[in-house]
Image (cartoon, helix red, strand yellow):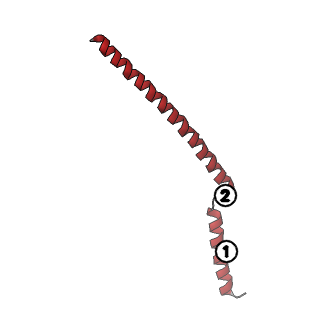
Amino acid sequence: MDDKAAKKLAEILGRVYEEVAQAVTKKEFNELKEIVRDLAHAQERTESRIEELAHAQERTESRIEELAHAQE
């Protein structure tokens, strides 16, 4: 193999190495999937809690109306 071909091969192998080094590993991908799953569950809990708070707000407003009418 001549010098020119060897240099070109080394250049290509260097690029391939960089690509592989920057690629996401299967382990990292699985960790990311787990994080996304946890975030989805947290979002569900947040939405449920917001719904509870909205109902509590409705009850509070209803009680305030009752008190206002009773005061009149």
Q: x%, y% of residue 34? A: 63, 46
Q: Quadrant of residue 64?
A: top left
Question: For this rendering, which residue is in front, 11 or 71?
Answer: 71
- At 65% from the left and 65% from the top, the residue drawn is 20
Quarter of the picture containing the C terminus is top left
Q: Which residue is mark 2?
A: 25
- At 59% from the left and 46% from the top, the residue drawn is 36
- At 44% from the left and 29% from the top, the residue drawn is 54
Q: Quadrant of residue 42?
A: top right
Quarter of the picture containing the N terminus is bottom right
**What residue occupies the far bottom of the structure in this picture?**
2
Q: Is residue 29 left or right of residue 66?
A: right
CA gap, disc 1 and disc 2? 20 Å
Q: Is residue 33 left or right of residue 43?
A: right
Q: Quadrant of residue 45?
A: top right
Q: Is residue 41 above or below residue 31?
A: above
Q: Earlier in the sequence, mark 1 or mark 2?
A: 1
* Secondary element at image label 2: loop
Question: For this rendering, which residue is in front, 24 or 70?
Answer: 70
Q: Tag count in the figure?
A: 2
- Circle 2: is it few (<14), some (14-19), or many (20+) Cα within 10 Å? few
- Circle 1: is it few (<14), some (14-19), or many (20+) Cα within 10 Å? few
Q: Is residue 58 above or below residue 19?
A: above
Q: Which residue is mark 1?
A: 13
What's under tag 1, amino acid-wise? Answer: Leu
Q: Is residue 63 above or below residue 4?
A: above
Question: For this rendering, which residue is in front, 6 or 70?
Answer: 70
Q: Which mark is residue 47?
A: none
Q: x%, y% of residue 5? A: 67, 85
Q: x%, y% of residue 67? A: 33, 14
Q: Is residue 55 above or below residue 69?
A: below
What's under tag 2, amino acid-wise? Answer: Thr
